[in-house]
Amino acid sequence: MELLSLESHVSGYERKTLTLRMRMIRMEGESMADQRDLVHLNRLKCFNDAVFAIVSTILILPIRKIPENSSKDLETELDKRWKQLVVYFISFLVICSVWESHVHRFKILAHVDDVLVWLNLTSLMFTSFLPFACALEGNYPTKYLPLMLICADMLVVELLEVAMIFYSFHHDYLLIDELKDLSKEQQKERRNYMLAKKLLNPMLYILAGSLSLVNSVTSWVVISIVIITPCIHRLIGFIFRKCKFVRVAGADFDLMFGNYIDTERVECFSDGVFSIVSTLLVLDITTENLPSENCVEQFGIDRAVLNMWPKFLIYAANFIVIALLWFIHHSLFHCIKKMNQFMLVCNNISLAFVGFFPFIVAILNKFADKPRKPDDSTKLAVQCGSVVIFMASMSQAVVFVAALWKGPSHLEPKVNPAVSKTSHNYLTLKLAILPVISLAAYSIAITASALIIYIAFHAGAFVTPFLFLALKFCWGHREVGVLRHDVAMDPDLETWVPPPHRSRLRLQKNFIGDTTLSQSLAC
């Protein structure tokens, strides 16, 4: 205030001098900020998403290896590997939960410095160690050490998260403007909010590590609770706020407890999983099933490669299925505005089933690559593939149902039936194709012969893309941009309120000179 009063009494020359001096002070402050080595977050976010996507998908690699000279049937192989498959599934979802914590931590940051970058890289190093610990647990489930390694590794990751939160609030120039402009007391209060939800996971890891000395199954049950911690965090937030008798605005409360997650980050992580899994499919025909030197010398390289046509067929069919799952995911997230915790968990479950595909390709190449000699293992292999496709696609459908239930705050109005039935039906049919096809393949595998099952599975994979094209020609060319203006939106209820009497405008043709005007609105 004294500076403003002084400025009002000085002359024009002195005012210019004072303005120049203030500008120099501001430039000096900016140069001091540059000396802190502050950098933007975008590249670090992309690097984090890539590391988490790779770590979660390579968990399946130790399981997919089936000895080429093994004479066991598929049922025996599955009995041998079911514990490894359960470990993979839980570990995948736990890694997704850790990734979710990383995403919410970055929401409070505007910049990162060298210290924060190295803390983040250290956290990623411990995260990338998980595939080894999980593979060790899958091979030696009765030993306590592998489970102790998993719990200790995840505990270190959580402690590093706590350290990064403390460091960020201690150096408030790293925070976003909404937090940086608050007083120290208010910043401390919001920091405690974020730390409150960090208490749950370390407690679970410590408890699971302790129980591993007694019963490994109970320990894994405790670890599996981490999967739903995004849903539990909101409850913890309400309890913490009530006990502290502190009232915080809704947006501020959501920021501290991570009640919602950016769809852009979910799309990046999901795209990483889809891309890595789709490229892992080729491992079978480039490593285990590559023509041997003896085969090439005996039959020639041309015939040796041609004899691999069943494996090429299996690779192409599964790649097409993954591409269709990505296409459905892309279409769904194009219509989603915001995601809550339940939708995030469902998306993670869908990605976990997508991660099973390298194993599905391995068992299909081993037990379903001989169409002339199909057996019960062929049936079981097709059934396993059908179950994976069904669960991956149905989990995405549940995300759509949850967004539809929440209303306009989570879903674009154009795909709500009260606003545009055509767009809603188009997306619904997209989401329904793969579950129906996979369910039909599974049903055929129960009653039909093994040869028919083999043909039906591959025919379904190659025909399904044409079903999407037919759906596009039937529904996609319709007028989907007309919204019903007689539908009211209640922001408090976050839902669409239909009018008391629905009107129907009949098709009318008005001729104005040489121009024909046609209008139609189906309500």
Image (spheres, rainbow, N blue to C red):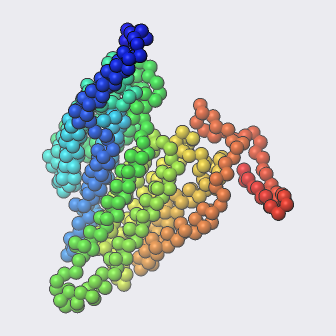
Camera sees residue 437: yes
Tell me: 362 left or right of 465: left
Where is residue 223 drawn, in percent x and y?
28, 42
Camera sees residue 398: no
User: Which residue: 82% across, 63% down?
Assistant: 514
In the image, residue 10 above or below residue 108: above
Q: In terms of depth relative to the viewer, which is nearer, 436 or 318? A: 318
Q: In terms of depth relative to the viewer, which is nearer, 51 or 291? A: 51
User: Which residue: 84% across, 58% down?
Assistant: 512
User: Which residue: 34% across, 81% down?
Assistant: 309
* Quadrant housing residue 31: top left
Image quarter hosting the N terminus: top left
Where is residue 185 drawn, in percent x and y?
33, 17
Q: In terms of depth relative to the viewer, which is nearer, 59 or 512? A: 512
Where is residue 431 drawn, in percent x and y?
52, 58
In the image, residue 409 above or below residue 182: below
Q: In terms of depth relative to the viewer, which is nearer, 493 or 451? A: 493
User: Which residue: 37% across, 41% down?
Assistant: 228
